[in-house]
């Protein structure tokens, strides 16, 4: 501010005309230098609300690596776990809206506030893109008497409530809601199959292989280890179409005529009110990543389902997911308030 005041005062004096011109010239050179400092000028933090080594962590790391190449700045993934996803999602939402803290937003954001764990919703973020959506499969022990999903469905319908036991995640988690939605689609009560909470798909699949469960609803990629080991088999997936990596696993619609799908989705976002130019830039880069051979190969190798939506469509998708998850949770007596 002092430089501009001095410059104006000098320009008023005829004797200082030369000095005024020099100062004005210096000012002309200084302003463009500031304007040309384009985002990003320093490292970006990418928050992952879930632990290292999991599916969400894998997806965010391939995205971060590709962003780092295109943006020319380090993109550092930080795992902020805890509170059933609340800690990491809060870290994204509460960050300064300057584009230097972004994160991967998962389907749990459409569930946590219904459980009373947080007040955060999808509306507390600047949505940048949807990058992935994994539907659940219905897995059974390899020695199960049910050879296809119709046989299993018929047996569940004929059985008294609570006879069949299922797992795949914690109480009220995404795979629990998948079971609830499937049961409702068959005209059954949400608790007709007893839910056994677990710390994730891996321990649930181990319990299934050991004979402690009748079925597990989790994504087929999560069940792949046990399936490849010959200890489990997948009877169907809750998706509009088959997964190319598991092309022998039919959809519920094909086998039961049930048009029901759900999934564990992942998107990239930042805190609310990100600068428009930053949001536009990152969104464009995410589309390039989604279309890249590296991303496609990475996802295909892991059996992860690719699904893209731009910023506007992703925001709408998350809103629809929020309503659907809330309805399932209320039906299952899992919603608070």
Image: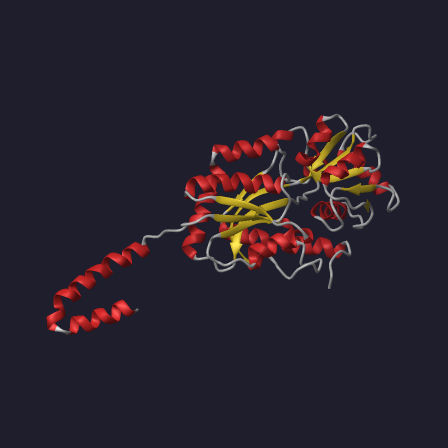
Looking at the picture, how far across and down is residue 119, in whole percent? 64, 62
Q: How is the image coloured?
A: secondary structure
For residue 25, which quarter of the picture? bottom left
For residue 241, which quarter of the picture? top right
Looking at the picture, how far across and down is residue 215, in whole percent? 79, 38
Q: Compared to 187, does 206 lie above or below?
A: above
**Along the viewing direction, whichever of 207 and 96 lies nearer the viewer:** 96
Q: Quadrant of the C terminus?
A: bottom right
Looking at the picture, how far across and down is residue 139, in whole percent? 75, 35
Can residue 239 be seen in this snapshot?
yes
Can residue 256 be seen in this snapshot?
no
**Along the viewing direction, whichever of 140 and 199 lies nearer the viewer:** 199
Q: Residue furthest left?
A: 15
Q: Residue at x 63, y 38 (%)?
A: 53
For residue 111, which quarter of the picture? bottom right
Q: Compared to 18, does 143 lie above or below?
A: above
Q: Quadrant of the N terminus?
A: bottom left
Say whether residue 275 is left or right of residue 54.
left
Looking at the picture, how far across and down is residue 41, in whole percent? 40, 50
Say whether residue 228 is left or right of residue 300.
right
């Amino acid at each position: 501010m002092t430089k501009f005041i001095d410059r104006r005062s000098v320009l008023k004096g005829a004797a200082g005309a030369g000095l005024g011109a020099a100062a004005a010239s210096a000012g002309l050179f200084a302003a463009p230098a500031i304007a040309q400092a384009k985002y990003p000028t320093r490292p970006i933090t990418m928050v992952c609300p879930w632990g290292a080594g999991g599916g969400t962590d894998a997806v965010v790391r391939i995205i971060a690596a590709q962003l780092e190449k295109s943006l020319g700045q380090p993109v550092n993934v930080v795992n902020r776990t805890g509170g059933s996803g609340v800690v990491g999602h809060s870290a994204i939402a509460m960050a300064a809206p300057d584009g230097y803290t972004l994160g991967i937003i998962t389907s749990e954001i459409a569930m946590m506030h219904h459980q009373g764990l947080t007040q955060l919703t999808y509306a507390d973020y600047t949505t940048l893109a949807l990058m992935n959506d994994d539907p659940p499969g219905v897995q059974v022990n390899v020695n199960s008497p049910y050879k296809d999903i119709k046989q299993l469905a018929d047996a569940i319908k004929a059985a008294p409530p609570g006879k069949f036991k299922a797992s795949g995640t914690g109480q009220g988690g995404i795979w629990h809601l998948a079971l609830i939605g499937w049961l409702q689609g068959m005209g059954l009560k949400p608790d007709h199959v007893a839910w056994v909470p677990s710390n994730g798909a891996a321990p649930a699949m181990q319990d299934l292989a050991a004979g402690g469960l009748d079925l597990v609803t989790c994504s087929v990629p999560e069940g792949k280890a046990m399936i490849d080991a010959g200890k489990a088999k997948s009877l169907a997936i809750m998706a509009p179409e088959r997964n190319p990596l598991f092309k022998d696993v039919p959809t519920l619609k094909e086998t039961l005529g049930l048009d029901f799908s759900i999934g564990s989705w992942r998107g990239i976002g930042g805190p609310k009110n990100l600068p428009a130019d930053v949001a536009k830039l990152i969104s464009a880069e995410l589309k390039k990543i989604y279309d890249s051979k590296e991303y496609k190969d990475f996802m295909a190798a892991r059996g992860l389902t690719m699904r893209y939506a731009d910023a506007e469509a992703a925001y709408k998708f998350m809103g629809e997911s929020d309503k659907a998850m809330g309805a399932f949770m209320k039906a299952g007596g899992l919603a608070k308030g």
